[in-house]
Amino acid sequence: MKINIETIPHTQQRYPTIGDYWDSADGVQQIKVSDMKNEDYEFLVAIHELIEKHLCRKANIKEEDITNFDIAFEKNRENGNVDEPGNDPQAPYYIQHQFATAIEKEVARALGVDWEEYDKFVDLFN
């Protein structure tokens, strides 16, 4: 198993998201997290993406289906809506996203990160 987790400028994401994942042609699992100038926030997003990605793979949910759903969600996002695509019950990875969020919240608590402040900050990227 080889996983590459990187913080990148938000403008370099494949679409408007703070966390993204895919398998590169050489089989390396890629996780890209938007630079938020806060190591704990970036770590929380990375943990979320890592968990969600693995659970989706185990459930045979294709990365292409996830990406296509996310891109369509973002394209049709109503002004002022800050929901994450994975919170939509129609998302093909809804269950995996919810579980990853639950773990992310627990890690935030262990780090002493205020979830509400973190969540509001993350919403600024939507």
Image (tube, rainbow, N blue to C red):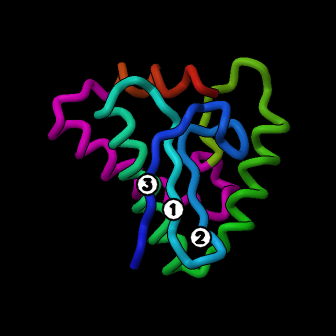
Magenta includes 40?
no
Tell me the element at label 3: strand
Residue 86: % across, % down: 59, 50
Query: In the shown orientation, is residue 64 left or right of residue 19?
Result: right
Query: In the shown orientation, is residue 23 left or right of residue 64?
Result: left
Residue positioned 62% across, 69% down in the render? 24
Look at label 2 and name its amino acid: Asp
The quarter in which the C terminus is drawn is: top right
Look at label 3 and name its amino acid: Ile
Q: Residues within 10 Å of mark 2 (few under 14, many from 20)?
A: some
Task: Between residue 48 and residue 10, name the one nearer to us.
Answer: 10
Tell me the element at label 1: helix
Q: CB atoms at circles 3 and 1 under 8 Å apart? A: no
Tell me which label, 3 or 1, sits earlier in the chain: 3
Give the magenta part as a residue range.
86-115
Q: Which mark is residue 23?
A: 2
Magenta includes 88?
yes
Give the residue number, with chain letter if any, for mark 3: 5
Say which quarter of the image contains residue 105: top left
Tell me the element at label 2: strand
